[in-house]
Every structure is written in structure tokens, then in C-alpha cells.
Image: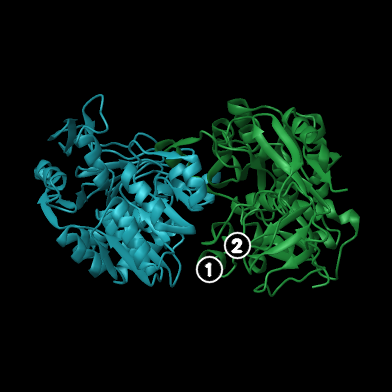
Chain colours: A cyan, B green
């Protein structure tokens, strides 16, 4: 196993990112990842990143019980595989989903790999090396060998933020010619704009009051920007759609206000997707009933879309890596969290080495 | 206007059904229906019926402020039309939806006529004559003239109970070969069974613990009956589907328990429809998120389906009128409510004369 470097002789002495409590991110010595099951792979990450969802525990809004290793977005070079792994091999460049999947169970076969019966939610990816369980069902190798460094940010984006934005558009039933509203101008919402564009939406309305994010939304394909929120935002969408409402609404935040804004912006019979873990959201059945919307969401089944998304990136059709507007070396990960928490950065890329 | 009989000479002296308070149904003299707007029609009903949803106010679970005329399911002979009505004419036999629609507004054109911008929810149909607003957009005439008396119950069913069961199956995305669960063994649920069968479902699991309803469910196409409810019911569905869950679940009750039972019986990526007005239902966003279900419901856009349903009835392909297991003369309407309230009758047909 020429590629396996996790030997006693050349231990990685790996450092990784750990959240100790609200605002307390540390980069510290951690155990080197090892093959624990024959279906595992170890990959070496050229870069990693911070997710908007990492901010929930960082802000204390989703309490943690103990120091928690962070990071669930990843791509990189296969270093070592377990004895049962057949579809990827050392040296390949792979992208995986934030949720592992065997890709063979009934839920996976229906395209809901993020509800795989063997699902684990990834952690520990804000580090130079990562153990990926269920490697055969979770990882997708890039065609034609290793991609150029310039593609790494966009391939990394496929792992979650683009895959989730893409699912948001798909789950909101975006069709050619559609009028689409995106609630939330975080990285997922911005890539929801890109996804809606790729799916042929005609009118793409991004709700944002932040200049840099508005600019990126336009670059990704937004045709309109709405700065109003809540009831005012709904009224504005209603006015822009001549009282009808939008065909598709992507809810990319996860709060009660954003969810109600999304539901009320859709036309009767329209579709609302929600892809951020809802925090404190409660839907009144009778209110939902009379809106006549289709509602679909959940953890994005990124694995379903990975081959297509990798292909779009490799062929230069999309450049989702543009969402990274702050680049730091991995050991300065704490600064990356702070910048995102303060909304100074949309999304932070962390370079390894 | 040879068919117009609402003249001063032959006033109808009409009696109709009025709810005064919980359990207090009266059949009493009411104003004769008249053309109020040029888009109205007056129809004469050979029969009418009581809806499961009428039991909410009858039981005091949906309080009323004043004596309320009841009834929203109807079919019958056109007696008179307003000057603007073009698509139906006196003498024709017509079926309408419980929700009026112009059938031309954007929501109607998308197939959501029950969210028509001019929608009114019908009342006053438990009577011999009825004013129907927006006649052109609301009513559909039977082909080839008046149907035989034997078809009246099934045509009456199209107006709401079948149309709603059909929407439940459609909104739950029932496809050929699907495994379908129906929560609720009321008339809508039973006709949801019939609808799922017509749409080609392979396995149709009716949840019921009532012998007469189980029997009718089987006649309508149920392949399995589950008597357990709540968590036990969910566990049973899980077991029957080898741990996967159902492709489509029709929620035809409208309570918190039935809604959660429906959501939990679906597989990840499966579809749940809900067609009874939810009473006291609250959905927790985070719980819904991880189920990965598609959720769609609302007041059934019966008008969308009426031509197809009338055709199926006229051609003898379906016999939804079988849900009427109690037939009473209209002036004994109070007995009909009581029998349904006590679950002695599934659904009561009220004969006029």
C-alpha cells in the first residue's frame, strides 16, 4: 500500500479543529485518523471550509455536551482504503457528502442517500486528514485524475454548500421558465441562485440586504434583489408577481421568520424547499393547509447529485467556489469562524499547509 | 326561460338545514335562492348529503357565531342562470365543487381552483335548491343529458368526498406500483383507497378498526388493513414495508395524531398529503426535516378533476356512491348528523322528496 502513510514511522501528528463552547474554537493535536472498518477510506484534504451550520453550535444556539471536532465538507486525495473498498483507490481525487451512505439501501436507491440506513453525519473535516466511512457509497472520484488546484474550491463546494443549494432548487421543483425566490443570502442561498439558473429559471429573486452578497447573487444569476424581509418582503414578492406568488421558493436559513416568509411567498400549488436545519420552527397545520404549497426538505442528498455537479465544475460550466470570499491557513480556523459569525465573510476556505 | 321556476307565482317555500349550535340541526323555512349576480346559477338538487367536515361545527369543535346554513356538496338540474352565464343552461345536469372558482385566474389555470381569487366556500346545499356563484367556472355538465337516478349518489360524491379523496391520492403522488397508506376510514379516506386503486397503486393499506369500513375499503381496492393506531400503527407499517415506509400516505382526518402517524409512515422521500382541515395540528420543523417527506395538501381543487371523475362515473368505471350507507329524506337531516356523529353511518345521503 504505497499510498498509505499512516504508519507508526510517519505518524501525522495531526492537528484539527475542536469546538469547546460558544465562540471557543481551538486548533489542537488530535488522534490521526485510521481505518477502523474495512469500508473506510482515509483522505488527505488540500483545503477544507466552514459551513453556515457550524455557526449554530459556535453561537451556542445548538448546545454541545463536550468538546466537538468540527467540519463536514471535504474533498481530497485518497491515502488509504479498507480491505472492502472497491470503487475508489489511493491516489484518486474524491468528493464526498456531509452524510455518509452505502448507496445501496432502499432509501439510497430512491435518491435519499442522506437518509441511508447506515448514515453518519461527518465531523472532523476541518483537519488535514479525514476518515470517511462507507467509502464506496459516499465518495465520487473526479474523472481524468487529479484536478488543478484552481478547481479545489469548487469541488469542495460540491460536498455540501452547492449540493445543498442544488437540492433546494430541485426540492422546490424549479423548472425552465419558473419564477423563483431565494430566502437567505448565505452561501447555500447564493448557490441556490446558481442552481436555479442552471435549471432554467427565468426570474430569480434573491432576498438580501447585504451589498457583497447581492453582487454575488447577481453573478450567479439573480435577476432581482429584494431587500425587504418578513411581511414586507412577502408583500414585495406579491407585487412583483402581480399578486400570484412564486412558483418555487428556496428557504435557506432555518428560522421561523424565514420559513413563514418562504411559505407566504409561494403561489397556491407552488413549492417551498427548506434545507437548513430548522431551529425553533413550528408550522401551524391549518395555516399551511390554506397556502396550498408543496413542502419538501431535509438534509440534502448530496450524493445523488455529486456526479453531475463534479462534471459541471470540471467542465467549467459553474464556479461555485466563488462563495469563498475569505481564505485562511487551516491553523487560523478560529478567525474564519469569527468572520462568518460577524457576517464579514460569506464562507471561509481553509488551506492545508 | 322555460326552466326558470323561481317566479312569484310558484315560490318554492324552501326549507333548508341550519346549525344552531352543537348538536342542534334544524330543518326550517329559508329564503328561496335567487340569482344575485349575472354569473350565478340556481340548481335543483335531487339529493344532497352530509360531509365529515360538517361534524366539526356540529360537535362544537369549530364554534359558530350564528345560526349557519349547512351543506356544500351538490349536483342537480340547472333551473335558472344569470345573464352572464355561458357554459351551462337550464335543464342540464351539473356537478360543482364545494369551492367556487372562475376557472380563469392564475391559480385556477395552475389547477388550484380551490384557491381561486374569487373563491367562495359553498354553504346552504342541504336544501332542495341552491344558488351557485361563478357558474361557468364552478359547474361541469354531464355529457348526454340527465343521468339515471342510480348515478346520482356517485355524481354527488364527485362534488367533494370523491374529489377530495382523489386529490389526496394525487397530492401524495400515487403512481403505478406504489405502496400507499390511507390514514382515516371516513368517506374521504375510503374514496382515497378507490382513487389510489385507479391510479395503479399495487399495495393499498387502509388503517381502520371498524368492520363495515374495512369491508368497504376492501371493495374499493385495499389490499391490507391495519387496525393499530399512532406509534403502533407506524410500527406495523414499518414492518409491512420491511423497514422502508410507504411511498405515499394520505392523511384524511386532520388531527395531530393522524398527521404524525401519516408523516411517520412514509419513507424518506415519500409523499404525504393532507386534505382534512387540520384542527390543532402543529408540525415541528426539525422533526419534519429529518423525515425527508414531501408534504402537500389543502382544500381539494375538485374542479380540476371533475370532468375526469364524472366520466369515470358515467362510464361505470367507479362507484363512489357506495360510501353512502344511510339514506334519509332531507327533512330528517338531523338524524343523519347524529348517525355520523356516533359513527353508525359512514356518510348520509339525503333524498329531496
- Quadrant of res B84: bottom right
- Residue B8: assigned label: none
Residue B127 appears in the picture as rendered: yes
Q: Residue under label 1, please give it.
A: B105
Q: Is residue B330 left or right of residue B256?
A: right
Mark drawn on residue B101: 2
- Residue count near mark 1 (Cα–Cα under 10 Å), binned few <14, some 14–19, many ≥20: some
Given the image, what chain letter belongs to the residue carrying mark 2?
B
Mark 2 residue crowding within 10 angstroms, few (<14) / some (14–19) / many (20+): many
Q: Does A298 appear above or below B118?
A: above
Residue A130 location, x and y as percent? 27, 42
- Name above or below for residue A331 compared with residue B21: below
Looking at the picture, how far across and down is residue B252, in whole percent? 64, 41
- Residue B237 x %, y %: 64, 34
Contact between marks 2 and 1 (CB within 8 A): the answer is yes
- In what element is the residue under mark 1? loop
Amino acid at each position: 500500500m504505497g499510498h498509505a502513510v499512516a504508519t507508526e514511522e510517519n505518524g501525522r501528528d495531526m492537528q484539527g479543529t475542536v469546538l469547546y463552547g460558544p465562540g471557543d474554537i481551538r486548533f489542537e493535536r488530535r488522534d490521526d485518523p485510521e481505518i477502523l472498518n474495512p469500508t473506510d477510506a482515509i483522505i488527505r484534504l488540500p483545503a477544507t471550509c466552514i459551513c453556515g451550520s457550524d455557526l449554530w453550535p459556535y453561537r451556542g444556539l445548538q448546545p454541545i455536551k463536550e468538546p466537538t471536532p468540527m467540519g463536514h465538507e471535504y474533498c481530497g486525495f485518497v491515502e488509504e482504503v479498507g480491505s472492502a473498498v472497491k470503487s475508489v483507490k489511493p491516489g484518486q481525487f474524491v468528493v464526498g457528502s456531509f452524510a455518509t451512505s452505502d448507496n445501496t439501501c432502499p432509501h439510497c436507491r430512491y435518491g435519499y442517500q442522506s437518509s441511508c440506513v447506515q448514515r453518519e453525519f461527518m465531523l472532523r473535516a476541518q483537519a488535514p486528514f479525514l476518515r470517511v466511512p462507507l467509502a464506496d457509497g459516499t465518495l465520487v472520484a473526479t474523472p481524468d485524475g487529479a484536478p488543478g488546484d484552481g478547481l479545489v474550491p469548487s469541488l469542495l463546494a460540491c460536498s455540501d454548500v452547492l449540493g445543498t443549494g442544488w437540492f433546494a432548487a430541485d426540492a422546490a421543483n424549479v423548472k425552465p421558465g419558473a419564477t423563483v425566490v431565494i430566502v437567505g443570502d448565505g452561501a447555500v442561498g447564493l448557490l441556490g441562485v446558481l442552481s436555479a439558473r442552471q435549471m432554467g429559471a427565468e426570474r430569480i429573486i434573491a432576498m438580501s440586504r447585504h451589498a457583497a452578497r447581492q453582487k454575488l447573487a447577481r453573478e450567479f444569476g439573480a435577476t432581482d434583489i429584494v431587500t425587504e424581509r418578513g411581511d414586507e418582503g412577502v408583500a414585495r414578492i406579491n407585487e412583483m408577481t402581480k399578486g400570484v406568488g412564486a412558483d418555487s421558493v428556496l428557504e435557506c436559513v432555518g428560522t421561523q421568520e424565514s420559513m413563514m416568509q418562504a411559505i407566504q411567498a409561494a403561489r397556491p400549488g407552488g413549492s417551498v424547499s427548506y434545507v437548513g436545519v430548522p431551529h425553533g420552527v413550528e408550522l401551524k397545520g391549518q395555516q399551511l393547509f390554506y397556502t396550498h404549497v408543496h413542502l419538501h426538505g431535509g438534509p440534502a442528498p448530496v450524493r445523488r447529485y455529486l456526479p453531475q455537479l463534479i462534471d459541471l465544475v470540471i467542465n467549467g460550466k459553474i464556479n461555485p467556489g466563488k462563495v469563498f470570499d475569505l481564505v485562511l491557513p487551516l491553523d487560523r480556523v478560529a478567525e474564519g469562524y469569527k468572520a462568518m459569525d460577524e457576517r464579514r465573510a460569506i464562507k471561509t476556505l481553509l488551506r492545508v499547509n
